[in-house]
Image (cartoon, rainbow, N blue to C red):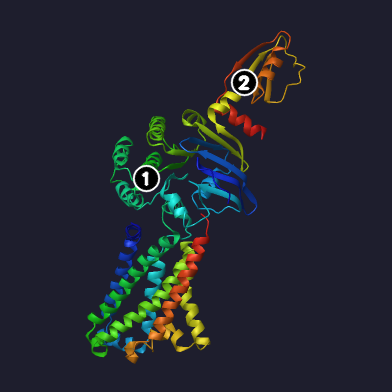
Amino acid sequence: MTQMNSELIIETSQLAKTYKDKQALAGLDLRVPAGSIFGFLGRNGAGKTTTIKTLMGLLRSDSGSAAVFGIPVADADRSIEIRRRIGFVTEDKELYPYMTVEQIIAFTRPFFPKWRTDFERRYLDLFDLPPKRKVPDLSKGMRSKLMLLLAICRGADLLILDEPTDGLDPAAVEDVLRELVAIAASTETTMFFSSHQLSEVDRIADHIGIIDRGRMIVSGSLDDLKASHQRLQIILADSNPPAIRWPAGVDSIHQEGRVVSLLASHNLDAITAEAHSIPGATVECFPVTLKEIFLETIRSN
Amino acid sequence: MLWYKGWLETRLKLAVVLGVVSCFIIFLHSLPSGSGRVSVVALTGVPRISVVWICAFLAGAGIATQPGLQATKGLHGSMLFTLALPVSRFRLLAIRAAIGWLESTVAISIFCYGIWLRFPAFREAVTGVDMIEFSGILIASASALYFASVLLATFLDDQWRIWATMLVPFIFWQLTSRIPLPAFADILRATGNGSPLITHTMPWSTVAFSLALVAALFLAAYKIAESREY
């Protein structure tokens, strides 16, 4: 086990996991800085849930290392300490069907010494959860809210949220995102969440990691990623493709008629200069969205 | 709180088991030959084996259908919530198994004392001490079967485990009828012809053997649960 960086809440190195004939993780290097809101993105089957389950001690990796709070997750005894400091929302939002809302809160509370009763009252009210209602009688959205409440109230140092807004209506999504940001700001809780809703990640994450085929293909500060990516729109004098050898850094080029759209991930100055060198062309630069970065990264991988 | 959770999960099944036990006692009492018949068959040893079967089946397959780390797919989702709690798998499994064991012990005790109290002829032939010792060996034997069910629960779904649990005493019965086991290992005999009801002595060696079997079965169940991935 390598020495883990104390500034990192989660750190994995060359993490690998294979299910029978499918490689779920193929040398995953993941680094989640303390205090960050880390959006963990990837296609279905990319390895997101396997990563999360490995961090929670529910799966064992075949090779590589993983640590949370600097504690190796493979150490079964010490992983209890990890779980005591984590608030976890599972992907399927399944809870005990024989318990009511208030029973499952009462059940969960004693396991977590830093349980926030103030949060419990606040989110019962804000999420409009009926205390006496049994779990199977809750809608999917209500179950998501209940799971979030159970995760948030733990007073955790790290929230691991697997599709936290799944099943929520747009108004509830707004409430949840706002509250997550507020919690991160007020309690310095690190958040590690996976989501397919890129617009949500774009709104609240300050770091992202994109996983594909079990490998981390992009990771870093969202601001840095956006600053390093740019879309150039080039309007040509005619519709003939420009005879240009683009410098390194161009991830994709699409042309429709006279309009060439180009996504660049680095070497922006050289690429822009090259675009300006096309006779009769006008060049405009646009910031890119996370969705564009994600789609292009996955496509080029 | 894991005890509370286990109680919520199993209380309905316990009620069903106690209902079945009560119905069985009432049925025996309603037989035309009444209490005398029960007294006679009780002393032949055969129905006592049935008692073990019934209690073990109800306890193992009925009450303990949801041990903490069982393989049932239907509860897989909520199991992730449980496994994400800051609790060791040993504690999860031990508490869950203990709840089912306590409930099966209650069911067996009620069955034994229900019969003893309900049938005067039975009380004439069997002393209170004999009955305590008999229920003791019955609980010890049923415990071995119950923990076999706990072990099966770590890798079989409920629907298969119930049948597998039923097969365990059958296999053991067939085994003892073909291979002569040492007296201390013959659990069925200790609850039948070798029981305190007939010999008026407690088969302590069989109790010790049953408890050793319980420990071995639980250890095996724990090792499987510990190594399982979810």
Q: Is residue A100 above or below residue A223?
A: below
Q: Is residue B193 above or below residue A242?
A: below
Task: Name the residue: 57% across, 20% down.
Answer: A287
Q: Residues within 10 Å of mark 2 (few under 14, many from 20)?
A: many
Kindly identify the amino acid type of the residue bearing the numbered disc 1. Answer: Arg
**Residue B152 shown left or right of residue A174 in the figure:** right
Q: Is residue A1 above or below residue B64?
A: above
Q: Residue A264 lies in what quarter of the image?
A: top right
Q: How many numbered discs?
A: 2
Q: Residue B121 lies in what quarter of the image?
A: bottom left
**Cα gap from disc 2 to disc 1, whole angstroms:** 43 Å
**Residue A75 shown left or right of residue A138 in the figure:** right
Closer to the camera in the image, A65 or A154: A65
N-terminal of the two: label 2 or label 1? 1
Give the x, y percent position of residue B178.
Answer: 53, 87
Task: Name the residue: 66% across, 35% down.
Answer: A301
Q: Is residue A41 above or below residue A268?
A: below
Look at the image and tell me in which quarter the N terminus of chain B lies.
bottom left
Residue beneath label 2, please?
A: A231
Residue beneath label 1, please?
A: A154
Give the x, y percent position of residue B40.
Answer: 31, 89
Q: Secondary structure at mark 2?
A: strand
Kindly identify the amino acid type of the residue bearing the numbered disc 2. Answer: Arg
Residue B66 can be seen in this image:
no
Chain for mark 1? A
Give the x, y percent position of residue B11.
Answer: 32, 62
